[in-house]
Image (cartoon, grey):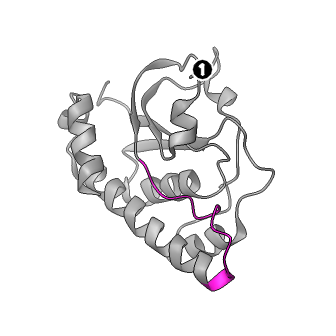
Amino acid sequence: MSPDRPFNVLFICRRNASRSLMAEGLLRKWGAGRFDTFSAGPEPREDADPITLDLLSKVGIDTENLRPKNWDLFTGPDAPDLDFVFHVCEQSAALKQPAWTGNPMIVTWRFPDPLALEGSETERRALLNLVFGMVERRVKLLCALPDHRLARLTASDVSDIAMAG
């Protein structure tokens, strides 16, 4: 990893409709240009979850470019060299991984799936708010690390960030 350019970070979730979009938007906001941030999934939904987009908008995160994308966009010769790949759900982490460009550190951050809850909209929003707080804490911890430390991170360092969230 090289601190002479922004760190390329990809957040992965199976459907890329909520948690990974939260992480992408939060890192873009809190990363202050230190990160080029992306999200994708192996089975992306057609559209992002509207309740997730509503929450992100309410907290000042630009949602204009947040949309589900297939993780195949981050493989092959035109893909960015990735420094970090964060799975934000166990389902995507359990799948056979594509050949990511670069030599990224791959880590799983486990968050509950707010889209799996079959409750009222109020219950879904409550779980979404809880998950949002969890994702935001981990992203802020990642952003708090200086570039020279990010460039030398180990898998155990990133696991420590996950445990803190």
Image spot of residue 81 (x, y percent): 49, 23
Against 78, is 160 above or below?
Answer: below
In the image, residue 118 lies at what x, y percent? 68, 70
Label 1 residue SS: loop
Q: Which residue is mark 1?
A: 98
Image coordinates for residue 16, horizontal then vertical, percent: 64, 48
Which residue: 58% across, 54% down? 21
Quarter of the figure that contains the N terminus: top left
Say above or below: 75 vs 22.
Answer: above
| Residue 139 found in image quarter | bottom left
Q: Quadrant of residue 70?
A: top right
Q: Residue at x 18, y 36 (%)?
A: 149
Residue density around tag 1, few if under 14, some if 14–19, many if 20 or more, within 10 Å:
few
**From where the camera sits, is residue 60 visible?**
no
| Residue furthest to the right | 46
Residue at the image position 30 percent from the left and 48 percent from the top: 162
Q: Is 77 rendered above or below residue 11?
A: above
Name the chief secondary structure element in magenta: loop
Q: Residue furthest front?
A: 118
- Residue type at mark 1 is Pro
Instruction: Please give the range of residues in magenta.
Output: 110-122
Q: Specify whether residue 40 is painted magenta.
A: no
Residue 151 % position (x, y): 25, 29
- Can I make out residue 41 in this image? yes
Q: Is residue 12 left or right of residue 152?
A: right
Quadrant containing the C terminus in the rendered view: bottom left
Q: Residue furthest bottom?
A: 122
For the residue pair 138 and 144, the one nearer the viewer reads as 138
- Residue at image position (19%, 34%) is 148
Q: In the rendered structure, does residue 121 fall within the stretch colored magenta?
A: yes
Q: Nearer the viewer, residue 158 or 145?
A: 158
Closer-to-camera residue (7/156):
156
